[in-house]
Image: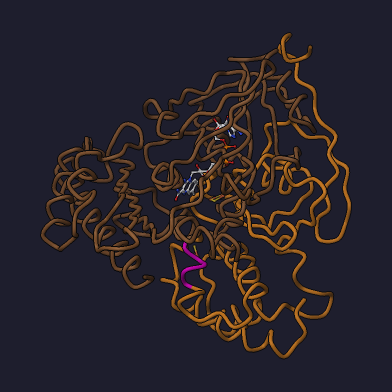
Chain colours: A orange, B brown
Amino acid sequence: MPGEKGIYMKQRLELKVNGQTYEVLVDPWQSLADVLREELGYTGVKVSCNSGNCGSCTVLLDGKAVKSCIMLAPLAKGKEILTIEGLATESNLHPLQEAFIEHFAVQCGYCTPGMILMAKALLDENPNATEDEIREGLVGNLCRCTGYVKIVEAIMAAKEKMKVTSSR
Amino acid sequence: MGPFEYFEPETVEEALSLLRKYSDTAKVCAGGTDLVVRMRKHLVNPQFVIGIAGIRELDYFRFEDDEGLRVGCLTNIRTIERSPQLQERYTMLPQVARQFGSIAIRNVATIGGNLCNALPSADMAPMLIALSAKAKLVSIDGERIVPLEDFFTGPGKTVLRADELLVEVRVPTPPPHTSGVYQKYTTRGGEELAVVGVATLVTWGSKDERCTDVRIVLGTVVPAPMRAKEAEAILKGKRIDDELIEKAAQIAADESRPRDSIRGSADYRREMVRIITRDVLRQAFERTQSAR
Ligand SMILES: Cc1cc2nc3c(=O)[nH]c(=O)nc-3n(C[C@H](O)[C@H](O)[C@H](O)COP(=O)(O)OP(=O)(O)OC[C@H]3O[C@@H](n4cnc5c(N)ncnc54)[C@H](O)[C@@H]3O)c2cc1C
Ligand code: FES
Ligand code: FES
């Protein structure tokens, strides 16, 4: 048994990220965030607290927000992973990304990928979310710069745009 | 974090034989929202991690006519929060789930992990104890059913053996005219763990105005979630008015055993037990009365 001899085997893992399928060899103690960043180069996944508290590492698994820093990578097997890199198309930013720029909802930008993906999950689930529901939905995403006002404004503006453009 | 060997059993049997084999050197990982944090801080350093998320047969809930609700250990908190059936038949459980972490935590955190991790602040525990829920624990040798009231033995401690898995939570159907309210109190809101958590479950007699049964269960302010039995006793069988509620709340506060911590001094927490207990009792009594 490798574990008993102190030799640990890497595991082969198939992950689907932003529509692409990858096969990676991971150490079983790597978090999903680490695998996405270090092995696959998705550095839009930000790691700040590395303990589940700040939300900067938020990604969507089958459309559901999760904190990838406290998830062992194998838990994402068989799921569609969406990171911030998968949101824009070749020619267009996503309405949430546009709105974050227009409303100056970005300062240092570290929380932004997580904020935008959390907001996407909220609006996909409830396209008519009220400001209160959006604020409540963002309790797990911390921003140390903006004071949240601009972020909430941006999401409220994007909400209207997302209703007209078909949701993506 | 690590190193460790990682297993992904696909059936309960496989998981149980791994648990028997590696016992104390192994840890079960469900959603990992507690375990990964604890491993990263080196509070636990298992040599083997048994990931059970792939055992799909453990992710369910269903209603059995005679025995009430059965919830598989892998059911996540978000599912409990959003289920229309639970909202209708066990309103108090989604009401607890809404106060749990954030959406991204609830999407992953499982009911089994919350109970087995056994923090005094575990939000699912007090209401489940109030509802007289039981846990089904299995090992290679067989199964046993343990009332949740007897499951927790101290902070992070339970009666679960190293070779056992908690596979199911059984929740009896609440009697008619029953309502439950849980309130978690935090100092700054958001995703914080509870400073005080109190669940109450109140049943009214069908004929008169008396409260036929009441449960008050404290979380966080005790080493392990605990019924405030003296407070319950002064309400049971009585006509309830505000004075009696105030009295019961004070007794519950006296029964609590809070400690000083960064989230509040013992005195402050004891006073908050009184206030939160009073509030949840008032709400539960109002709800049962308006439903009658
Ligand atoms: C940011 C953040 C916010 C949080 N907020 C809250 C909150 O508001 N309220 C709250 O109560 N908790 C909260 N938690 C704690 C945690 O999310 C919950 O306790 C969660 O329910 C744990 O479930 P899990 O599936 O992730 O457990 P895991 O981390 O997978 O497991 C927890 C423990 O239980 C054991 N275990 C798990 N499943 C079983 C099983 N079926 N049989 C035997 N043993 C098992 C594991 O070995 C481990 O020791 C929070 C955590 C974080 C990181
Ligand atoms: S980096 Fe994952 S929650 Fe902070
Ligand atoms: S913009 Fe800096 S943390 Fe949010």
Residue at 58% across / 57% down in the picture? B78
x, y percentage for residue A42?
74, 54
| Vertical position of residue B24 compared to residue B127: above or below | above
x, y percentage for residue A2?
78, 14
Q: Nearer the viewer, residue B117 or B58?
A: B58
Q: Nearer the viewer, residue A11 or B163?
A: B163
Q: Which corner quadrant of the image does residue B254 belong to?
A: top left
Q: Residue furthest front?
A: B207
| Vertical position of residue B48 compared to residue A18: above or below | above
Q: Quadrant of the N terminus of chain B?
A: top right
Q: Residue furthest top?
A: A5
Residue at 86% across / 43% down in the picture? A14
Q: Is A136 covered by the magenta stretch?
A: yes
Q: Which residues are magenta?
A: A135-139
x, y percentage for residue B161?
55, 19
In the displayed structure, does residue B284 sit left or right of residue A53? Answer: left
| Vertical position of residue A91 compared to residue A9: above or below | below
Query: Total of numbered circles in the picture?
Result: 0
Q: Nearer the viewer, residue A26 or B135?
A: B135
Residue at 25% across / 40% down in the picture? B228
Q: Which corner quadrant of the image does residue A85 belong to?
A: bottom right
Q: Quadrant of the C terminus of chain B?
A: bottom left
Residue at 43% across / 54% down in the picture? B175
x, y percentage for residue B287?
34, 67
Q: Main secondary structure of the magenta part?
A: helix
Q: Which corner quadrant of the image does residue B157 belong to?
A: top left
Q: Is B227 covered by the magenta stretch?
A: no
